[in-house]
Image (spheres, rainbow, N blue to C red):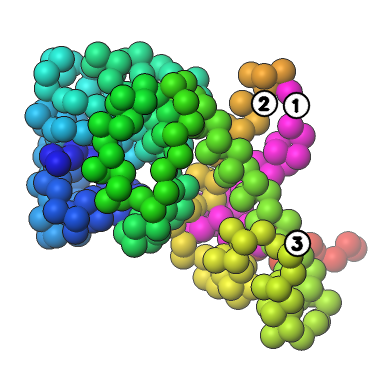
Amino acid sequence: MRVAVLGMGRMGRAMAQRLLARGHTVRVWNRTPGRAAEVVDAGAAEVPSPLDAARDAEVVLMSLADDRASRDVMGRLAALGPDEVTVIADMSTVSPSTSRELRDLAPGRRFVAAPVVGGPQAVVEGQATVLLGGEEEYARDLDPVWRDLFAVQHYCGEDPGGALTFKLLNNYLLMAGLAVLAEVVAAGQAAGVDPARLRDFLRRWPTVAPALHNRLDDVLDGDHKGWFTTPLGAKDVRLAVELGESLGLDLPVARLVEERYAEAAENGWADRDIAAVVELVRRRPEPSR
């Protein structure tokens, strides 16, 4: 298929690489030029605007940083004629209400919400999961892309916001679990327990969620060079807090978790993986005088 990928962050590049490897024709665009060199070398064509990427594409995949970026790019795509693009799929993590706005802005409302569960490497390896929301006809029109990109597809219903609700709840669980794991690791290390035994126990304990295992080494002694940065972590939990508020719910633990990742970003780890939240605990306060 002819696919346009808008947004050349780590996830956008991973999707473009996977699609190229599976034989699709790929055009890419990024707000800041120069980030697409790797996928251009692999065979993608880089173009100067979202409209140039999207025209005559059979599917447009948006992989953008936040709600504002998604609205901005969809606003540009709204200029497309009814026959210039088949379906636009937003893979970004945005609020459910923003996803519904994007559907209403999309040409002909041919829109699918498609947030991704899994990191860029899982996408490159075809092991990630996609959550699909929107008209089922449009979601199914993109089956050739979903089959090549993802190991698992979950259709979440006609409301595109439903797919984002599931994504935000999943990410909140990840972020909260990682913040607690960071405190457990820091406490164990400060107590002087045997490092190898601590690592082994944390891998075996059923109280440590399986999704945390791939960050355990990084929390224990890593350099936090992963892909999911602390500002993005704070943003995703903030969206979960706002989702609760829109439903009349207060999520006090979520607010605390958001604050932890925001604090990590503000204290020197803004370009580091969410595992860097452990560094907040390892900091020792100055002795009282």
> Considering the image in quadrants, where does the C terminus appear?
bottom right
Residue 125 position by quadrant: bottom left
Residue located at (69% from left, 80% from top): 200
The residue indicated by pointer 1 is 250
- Residue linked to disc 2: 244
The answer to whether residue 189 is above or below residue 11 is: below
Residue bearing mark 3: 207
Q: Magenta segment range?
A: 249-278
Residue 287 vertical placement versus 144 (above, below): below
Q: Which mark is residue 3?
A: none
Graded by Cα atoms within 10 Å as few (under 14), some (14 to 19) or many (20 or more), the crowding at tag 3 reads few
- Disc 1 is placed on an element classified as loop
Three-letter code, disc 3: Thr
Left or right: 48 with respect to 142? left
Look at 62% across and 49% down and name the residue there. 175
Q: CA distance from mark 3 to mark 1?
A: 26 Å
Is residue 266 shown to the viewer in this render? no
